[in-house]
Amino acid sequence: MDLHMHGLDDHFTLPQTDKVSASRPLEWLKLGWQDFRQHPLPSLGYGLLIAIAGWLVLAVASNYTYLTSTSITGFMLLAPLGAAGIYELTSERQEGRPTSFAQSLHDLLKNLGQIAFMGVVLGSVAIGWERVSCILFALFYGGEAVNLHFFWTALLGEYWMFTAAWIFGGFVLACLTFALTAVSIPMLADREVDVVTAMMTSLRVVMENLPAMIVWAAIIVALTAIGFATGLLGLIVLFPLLGHATWIAYKELVH
């Protein structure tokens, strides 16, 4: 599907982008696994850090049940930043340099300012969504004690319209965030570019490869769901796998 996103070049200096078939994400995942096996220990180190961060987030949210869903959303928004080090691992190997966890962290310094700014952007989105969710819960639930059982019961009960609207709002936010970050974070790790250029490149890549990116987003959601279903233990492996696959997708789509 060609949505003619080249008009972005009138306002931004963007790199060349390519188009791929809808089945290509499956190959990214396969190649990502092969890449993961080239340096498993440092990759697993990043996976473990993300799992620990997730456990801490859920531990805090467990004391405030109305924050559980929004904290998970915020975690998923910010977690991709943790893959920046994984992108450096692959870059080091492709350039014939020694790979290690410490070296990948050091290499992040070359564009750390813009990566950190991306973190501020994503963090602001997460905080904004959390605030909106809290306000909506307060307005629609009328001060009732909200727990997870009450929330999901409300889906088919008195508050089903609110619940449907809330889920739809989260879906729209997730789609927009995915479009702006699909390849922007590996691009920031790979090149000395600014956040806006990286996000606009990502937007063009997604819109010009919509079928493939829908498949890719579905794979990410499915594997992340498996990670949560296993008490985040699965993310120790699945997170770096997705990181390596995302790097491969970026290098194939952006030149």
Image (tube, rainbow, N blue to C red):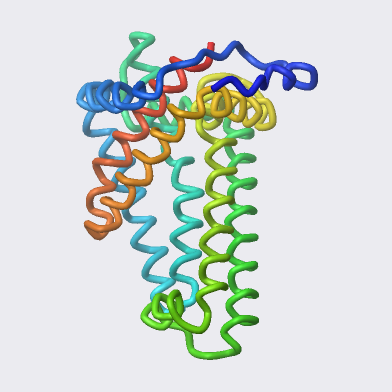
Q: Is residue 56 above or below residue 209?
A: below
Q: Nearer the viewer, residue 16 or 89?
A: 16
Is 183 left or right of 102, judged from the image as shown? right
> Residue 27, how many percent across, how many down?
29, 21
- Please tell me which residue is depicted at 58% across the width and 56% down the height of the picture: 126
Q: Is residue 75 left or right of residue 227?
A: right
Near-viewer residue (209 or 255):
209
Residue 239 point in image, percent of width and height: 32, 41
Rendered residue at 61%/30% (across/down):
203
Q: Is residue 242 left or right of residue 120?
A: left
- What percent of the width, then of the height, locates residue 83? 41, 36
Give 2 or 181, whichever is nearer the viewer. 2
- The percent position of residue 24, horizontal first and vertical second, equals 36, 21
Q: Quadrant of the N terminus?
A: top right
Q: In the rendered image, which quarter is residue 116 located in?
A: top right
Name the residue rendered at 67%, 22% in the picture. Answer: 5
- Can residue 65 be seen in the rendering of this structure? no
Q: How many marks?
A: 0
Farthest right residue in view: 11
**Residue shown at 46% from the left, 82% from the top:** 157
Can I make out residue 214 in this image?
yes
From this view, report whether residue 28 is shown above or below residue 15: below
Looking at the picture, does residue 158 appear above or below residue 29? below
